[in-house]
Amino acid sequence: MPSIGQQKGRTCATELYQQTIEQLQPGIQLQQQQAKEAAQQYLSQKLQGQEMRKAAGAISIPVVFHVVYNTPEQNISDEQIYSQLAVLNADFRRTNADKINTPTHFAALAGDAGIEFCLASTAPDGSVTNGITRTQTSSASFSANNNNIKRQDRGGAPAWDRSQYLNIWVGNISDDILGWATFPGMGSSSQYDGVVLFYKTVGEPPYNPFRTQFNKGRTATHEIGHWLGLQHIWGTGNESCSDSDFIDDTPNQYKPNYDCPSGTIVSCENGPYGDMWQNYMDYSDDACMNLFTNGQIAYMQAVLNSSRSSLLTSVACNGGLRARFEAETDTLIQAGEQVQFKDKSIGVKPSSWRWEFEGGTPATSTERNPTVTYKTPGTYKVRLTIANSQMSSTQTKEQLIEVTPNDLTVYPVPASDYLIIEQPAHVTLRQVELLSRLGQVMLSRKVTTRKAEFRTTGLPSGLYFLRISSSEGVITKKVTIIK
Ligand SMILES: [Zn+2]
């Protein structure tokens, strides 16, 4: 059986895929930048002692493996996937047996990431799953130059909702590539968010039957490191001492280390201990990497608590259910208009829905996706409770619906120090002028909102005219100001 990558060692296509996605989605860099800033903000708040969340025990991330196979060999066994889960849980909790191989000077920097992984037990449609999908494909192989492995119409398998699952695709990857990952901030490309693994890298012997130096499941550890925001330990460029992985406690390093190095490799004046080639984010063979540093761990935790925080409350592994809903139409409406609600609950399938619509008609509904009419101006809450025979869950959104009158309103009447001009929903103001009885313009302002407030403090008591232009035309209205 030919082994892979023997000539040049580990090959991760995360940077290559980054170029692919930048071409396909020109806005992606901004979204990734925002995700980085959100993580940095979390880190700085944490440093200031304002820790928002003290996790009780480890975080558990629901995972789905999409096995996309062309030959029977590529249709790897459930056991091989279970063994990958075990490797991930050991590596991210630092219970890996080979942690004893971390040199003492680096062991002081190594840590338990407090992150675990579980195979999803509930699919997005609420059905029971073992967390593994299997798709037979006519594609002989897949590459990081496109998203084919993630696209049903290109012979791949579609992602499950990335806000609830870590998607890991497993397939035959071309060009000796072992895998790649997406960095945080995939907003507009959420269907491509996740990790891709060459099928021979999944899990460890005896469940991984392939004889290569990458058969201990560390490709997944490395790629999930990227997925949680980590860069390669030698930096973002290729061979340079002036680039960085933006982690404080990893040594500056000139270039990747391949195969299984031994001893101290000094580069970029990082002596006496040299490169940290034992780090999961280097290019060493599976048998020779064994740690994340505390700095890397802090950054991964920050990503999980910011741009990937929806995973912290996912119920995909514990058979739970959680009510969630959204309005499909505008929530700012005129009296008499309708709002369409959509059930977006997650987890196991509910058998009943009970909606409560304060101020709405009907006031309650047991439909899954009801339509509600609001007749009276005001601000109203909406509540959804879902249940099955075992459990229930409720979501309430306070002040979700704002119902305006159907006509322009100006108040208070009479006015004294201020005037509020409010148009109905869907109408925006353009210009407001306050005229004296003689037609003299006392106040004039351009406005682009639906509602505007004017100070009238300096004006004498009397009768005035408001000339209001809006998207609906021009109206003149009498107002009285009394001091
Ligand atoms: Zn990589």
Image (cartoon, rainbow, N blue to C red):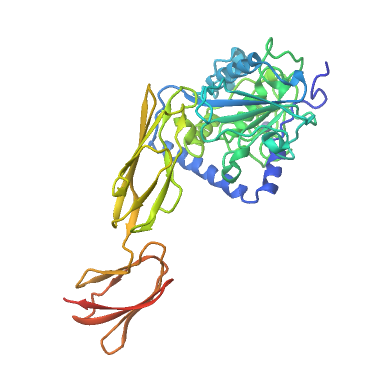
Q: Can residue 321 be seen in this view?
A: yes
Please state the horizontal and vertical placement of residue 248, each as a whole percent of the image.
Answer: 56, 35
Please state the horizontal and vertical placement of residue 422, each as a whole percent of the image.
Answer: 32, 66
Q: In which quarter of the image is ligand 1?
A: top right
Residues 141 and 404: in front is 404
Please state the horizontal and vertical placement of residue 465, each as a whole percent of the image.
Answer: 28, 81
Q: Residue furthest top?
A: 206
Please state the horizontal and vertical placement of residue 209, each as a whole percent of the image.
Answer: 73, 13
Tell me which residue sits at (27%, 90%) in the image.
438
Left or right of 155: which side holds 410?
left
Q: Is residue 261 visible?
A: no
Residues 166 and 155: in front is 155
Q: Which residue lies furthest to the bottom in this view?
A: 438
Tell me which residue sits at (25%, 75%) in the image.
456
Image quadrant assignment for residue 278: top right
Please determine whether, in this image, residue 357 is positioned above or below residue 143: below
